Image: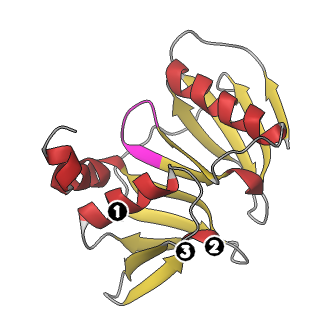
Amino acid sequence: MRLTETKRRSTAKTIKIRMQGIEGMFFYEVTAAEKKRIDRYFEELAAKEHVKDFIVFETSDRVTTVIVRGREVKLVEWATRARPIRTNRPLPFHMKVYVQNKPSPLFVHVHEPSDASWFVTALDGEPSQFTLFWPAVDSSGEIFTIPASDIILAEIDSAILDEGLRQLPRYKSGE
């Protein structure tokens, strides 16, 4: 993995990510604060410090939450927009997930927003000795599970996560 930086902008930053096993680059615009947090994560990962498996961040427009398995990243690059990137807009589905050994994404709908919020919160925490599974519903209504250990990158509608957080007991009480 290589971490580089080109031109800076004072507010939003564009991150370009290349993942192992997936063709092409992923482009996301994030706030300066998120950039610092993402940089710190990849610096710790490069130093082989004890670091969580995933970095979770939200796009600067607060439309999409991105989940990235750090050890599957081939390249992270910060740059001003070298070419126009489309603005994030609500996803026509709730979640797009890239898993190991499958170059194209799975498009899934979230059945329970609180399940999605719990799952993403768990991924953003410390590494777990337990195996996490994502209970997903595909476009035909079939329920299936995705082991967290298979997730390489995922995009989820931030509004779904916000709704789910409001449903979780610890967030309701303001703790």
Label 1 belongs to which residue?
Answer: 116
Residue in the image at 66% along x and 21% along y: 80
Residue in the image at 31% along x and 52% along y: 161
Which quadrant holds the C terminus?
Answer: top left
Residue 142 against residue 139 in the figure, above or below = below
Q: Is residue 2 magenta?
A: no
Q: Quadrant of residue 99 in the image?
A: bottom right
Which x, y percent locates residue 153? 60, 58
Residue contact between numbered discs 2 and 1, judged by CB atoms under 8 Å = no
Residue closer to the observer: 16 or 32: 32
The magenta segment is 59-65
> Are there few (<14), some (14-19), or many (20+) residues within 10 Å of tag 3?
few
Q: Amino acid at mark 2?
A: Asp
Which x, y percent locates residue 8? 67, 13
The residue sitting at the front extreme is 129
Residue 102 against residue 42 in the figure, above or below = below
Residue 153 against residue 2 in the figure, above or below = below
Residue closer to the observer: 83 or 137: 137
| For residue 141, side relative to residue 45 (left or right) | left
